[in-house]
Image (cartoon, grey):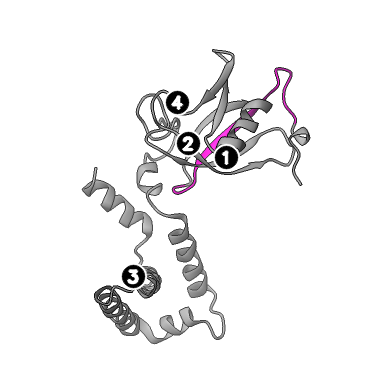
Amino acid sequence: MFNISELKFDANGLIPVITQDCQTMAVLMLAYMSKESLEATIKTGKVTYFSRSRNELWVKGETSGNYQVLKDIRYNCENNSLLISAQQIGPACHTGEQTCFYRYVHGENSDEAKSAIPPIFQRIYNVVVGRKAKPVEGSYTNYLFENGLDKILSKVGEETTEIIIAAKNDDKVHLTDEISDLLYHLTVLMVQRGVEWDDVAKELTKRYK
């Protein structure tokens, strides 16, 4: 059982906190917590920091309405920093940007598109890529690759038809299953044809700015 006393707060009674969006996995901000703000976060479910400039507890979004709804809290191997996963309501940054880390020292400015990719989509994509590179005996994914593009397209068409039937029957459970099947088969098709989720996210980001 975790005990807050295990954490190493600094001389001012504070510990640094990185907060991450639970859906996009984007890093939203860096702030600090005291023991009291950590306890308040756990108790209320709203991420609460300690404002060093105002010397008081600070509920993120209390003024702006851009609350952070707590999902989980982790701490590092040295017990001296926290990682919070939260649902961000509105932008995290006071500038209006979704994340405080919106400026670049180096690298391509593509975070908006990348953060639009649900982590589970990328995880499945990576598994499919791995199966293609290193086939596993009995793998359904490898069965599809071995039978080629026409087989993959056939499955995409089959799952699309199943979605239509489930939707017409107003069967939410069946519809959810079939949408999941379609997304998997679309992922196999994407890998087969060299399309990445990042490509799709960039296109959607251009369309729906």
Asked which quadrant contains residue 15, the reply is: top right
Task: Give the crowd class for mark 4: few <14, some 14-19, many >=20 residues within 10 Å.
Answer: few
Q: In the rendered image of this protein, does residue 155 appear above or below residue 81?
A: below
* Res. 34 in view: no
SS type, badge 2: strand
Q: Residue at x 40, y 71 (%)?
A: 184
Q: Amino acid at mark 3?
A: Arg
Instruction: Point out which mark residue 62 bears.
Output: 4
Q: Are marks 1 and 3 in contact (CB under 8 Å)?
A: no
Task: Give the crowd class for mark 1: few <14, some 14-19, many >=20 residues within 10 Å.
Answer: many
Asked which quadrant contains residue 168, the reply is: bottom left
Going by the image, does 45 lie left or right of 159? right
Q: Who comes first in sequence, dot 1 or dot 3? A: 1
Separation of residues labelled 1 and 2 (CA atoms): 10 Å
Q: Amino acid at mark 2?
A: Gln
| Front position among marks 1 and 3 | 1
Task: Give the crowd class for mark 3: few <14, some 14-19, many >=20 residues within 10 Å.
Answer: few
Q: Give the magenta-colored segment's residue range.
A: 8-24
Q: Which residue is mark 1?
A: 84
Q: Position of residue 151 (x, y in %)?
A: 34, 85
Q: Position of residue 195 (x, y in %)?
A: 34, 63
Q: Residue at x 54, y 86 (%)?
A: 138
Instruction: Point out which mark residue 27 bears.
Output: none
Q: Position of residue 30 (x, y in %)?
A: 54, 29
Separation of residues labelled 1 and 3 (CA atoms): 37 Å
Q: Amino acid at mark 4?
A: Glu
Q: Amino acid at mark 1?
A: Ile
| Front position among marks 3 and 2 | 2
Instruction: Point out which mark residue 193 bears.
Output: 3
Q: Are marks 1 and 2 in contact (CB under 8 Å)?
A: yes
Q: Residue at x 53, y 36 (%)?
A: 19
Instruction: Point out which mark residue 68 bears.
Output: 2
